[in-house]
Amino acid sequence: MSEMSGMGCSHGGRGSKRGNGSGDPDGDCGKYTRYTAEQVEVLEKVFAECPKPTFSDRQEMIHNYSILSNLEPKQIKIWFQNRRCREKQKKEANNLQSVNKKLTAANKLLKEENDRLQKQVSHLVYENEYIRQQLENISLDVTNTSCEPAVNSLQYSLRASNDPSGLLLVAKETMTEFFSKATGTLVDWVQLPGMKVLIDVFK
Amino acid sequence: MSEMSGMGCSHGGRGSKRGNGSGDPDGDCGKYTRYTAEQVEVLEKVFAECPKPTFSDRQEMIHNYSILSNLEPKQIKIWFQNRRCREKQKKEANNLQSVNKKLTAANKLLKEENDRLQKQVSHLVYENEYIRQQLENISLDVTNTSCEPAVNSLQYSLRASNDPSGLLLVAKETMTEFFSKATGTLVDWVQLPGMKVLIDVFK
DNA sequence: TGCTAATGAGCCGTAATAAA
DNA sequence: TTTATTACGGCTCATTAGCA
């Protein structure tokens, strides 16, 4: 202990103690003095390099920076303590905030992906159902033994591939047109009963 | 570590100072006294009801609770000030934290849902493929027994459904084959010269 | 050697004060 | 009044000295 020398709490350059004997309202016995901007600047600078100075570090800095000379070692110590505390709080808050941001972004992506998958599922389910239906129809046709219904199965299975919507329709129209022309103008065969069936198929 | 040695850094500071040499026990400056648990309890209770007591409110509570009688009105005032500040900070932190929790939970759910959908898609795609395969198999089976042309066209349509771009091509092939077989086996019409032309068209 | 009291650091919470 | 800062009581942890 000992040296404390000057004794008083902060005093030194600042408000220093005043006569004190007087009936000071609230104590003010020199406690609580705000450090000057210059002092804080120096302290911050040191803090950036070394947030946790040892006792000797602190001693040294008081020695090196005359602007801190009016501060007690204890004050320096406390200042660093408080500073670390503030840093920690700030860091925690920032951390949470940044985590929140990331989570929000991730959530958005996940939602979009979910949407996409949901649609894909819907589509697949539909497609699936459709193909199943074709399967059923075809097997029904086939069991009918006759060949004529087999032509129907062609129709169905062609419709089954109607997924890329439009394309087949075009094909169909093309065929219909072809037959129309074929039976009308292109060729003048004898009228065939079987041809009629074929044309109907493509209607 | 023990460098502490001499330096009176810490404590020494406290009791000492104050100019008056008198051995003041401690009270002196009257600064910084921790309130007792009982006092805090009472203060908290009031705070819960009224976080912002007026001057007269404060006066009153000092009067009503003897345990607070040794506190100055100013101290009560300050206590509420600090208390409000702490409350606010706490609330903000809690808010962030709770948002975080909710986001994390939502994230988890979304991930699970995503997984589920992903699996469902895989399953459906597989199932889809499987059914398609069956369609193809059936058509092959049927080919071996009868009605070849129609069944073949079924195969083509399957091909078409897998690759819509070749639809027209398939249609052409289908017709070609159909006519080819038709002129040969399917129907026993009289041989028609015009038919040959028709077939050429699809080549 | 092992246990316990003493010492001192750092952190937490908060009283008290100054500034905005 | 609210916000930011200074300062301190108190507790935990680690190191150490002293005693069994």
Image: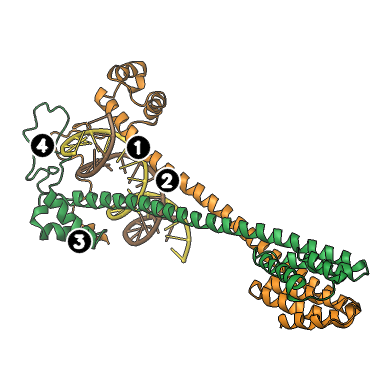
Chain colours: A green, B orange, C yellow, D brown
In the picture, measured across the screen, residue D10 lies left or right of residue A28, that is right
Q: Nearer the viewer, mark 3 or mark 2?
A: 2
Q: Nearer the viewer, mark 2 or mark 1?
A: 2
Q: Nearer the viewer, residue B168 or B96?
A: B168
Q: Which mark is residue B96?
A: 2
Q: Nearer the viewer, mark 4 or mark 3?
A: 3
Image quarter where the C terminus of chain B lies is bottom right
Dot 2, crowdedness within 10 Å: few (<14), some or many (≥20)?
A: some
What residue is pinned by disc 4? B19
- Residue B36 image offset from top left, x and y in percent: 36, 31
Q: Chain of mark 2?
A: B
Q: Chain of mark 4?
A: B
- Dot 3 falls on a residue whose secondary structure is helix
Q: Nearer the viewer, residue A4 or A143?
A: A143
- Dot 1 falls on a residue whose secondary structure is helix
What residue is pinned by disc 1? B86
Q: CA distance from mark 3 to mark 1?
A: 33 Å
Kind of residue at disc 1: Arg
What residue is pinned by disc 3? A57
In this rendering, does residue A119 appear at all? yes
Kind of residue at disc 2: Leu
Q: CA distance from mark 4 to mark 3?
A: 30 Å
- Residue A157 image offset from top left, x and y in percent: 77, 67
- Residue B153 image offset from top left, x and y in percent: 78, 75
Q: CA distance from mark 2 to mark 1?
A: 16 Å
Cβ–Cβ under 8 Å for marks 2 and 1: no
Dot 3, crowdedness within 10 Å: few (<14), some or many (≥20)?
A: few
- Decide which of tag 2 and tag 1 comes sooner along the chain: 1
- Dot 2 falls on a residue whose secondary structure is helix
Q: Nearer the viewer, mark 4 or mark 2?
A: 2
- Decide which of tag 1 and tag 4 comes sooner along the chain: 4
Q: Chain of mark 3?
A: A
